[in-house]
Image (cartoon, rainbow, N blue to C red):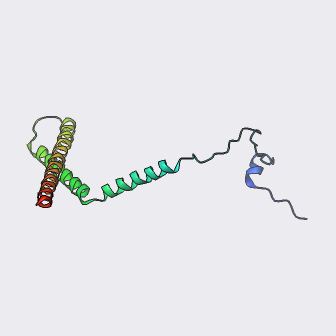
Amino acid sequence: MARTATSKSSRARGGKTATKTRAKPGTAVARRPASKSSSSEGMADGVGDAFIKLLQSPLAAELVAVAATAALAALAEHGFSSGGSSRGRRAGKAVKEAGKAAAAAVGRRLGTELEEIRKAATASKGGATK
């Protein structure tokens, strides 16, 4: 004479079993993947691949290093030279100056990189015409 097994949660509710709720008929919507034309998918893949290649380029790594170095130098300089302002304002001002220094350093580095490209292009034009 075995007893029927009941779960602990059903005993806690007074022995009643839980009933499952059903969705109303006609309210369920099947999701379909958005259909894109093959040309837009190919272009998106090309843009994504180009962006990944750009991030992996040595120039991008060099620019990040230049920006980090300039920001760190600006933070160190501000930490040593600032005087009687409150700590919160000083930190905010230091971060702002570090961002400006990083942007200026990246701008200078990009300028020199573009100048080198221009020089190489003019040198190759001069060599090709001779």
Which residue sits at x=31%, y=55%? Answer: 54
Q: Nearer the viewer, residue 11 or 89?
A: 89
Which residue sits at x=36%, y=54%? Answer: 50
Q: How many marks?
A: 0
> Quarter of the image holding residue 96?
top left
* Residue 120 image offset from top left, x and y in percent: 14, 57
Which residue sits at x=25%, y=55%? Answer: 60
* Residue 3 image offset from top left, x and y in percent: 86, 61
> Quarter of the image holding residue 45?
bottom left
Left or right placement of residue 26 versus residue 38 in this view: right
Q: Quadrant of the N terminus?
A: bottom right
Outermost front residue: 130
Which residue sits at x=16%, y=44%? Answer: 104
* Residue 33 image offset from top left, x and y in percent: 59, 48
* Residue 62 image offset from top left, x and y in percent: 21, 57
Outermost right residue: 1
Q: Nearer the viewer, residue 55 or 12?
A: 55
Left or right placement of residue 128 versus residue 5 in this view: left
Q: Quadrant of the C terminus?
A: bottom left
Q: Nearer the viewer, residue 68 or 84?
A: 68
Left or right placement of residue 80 versus residue 5 in this view: left
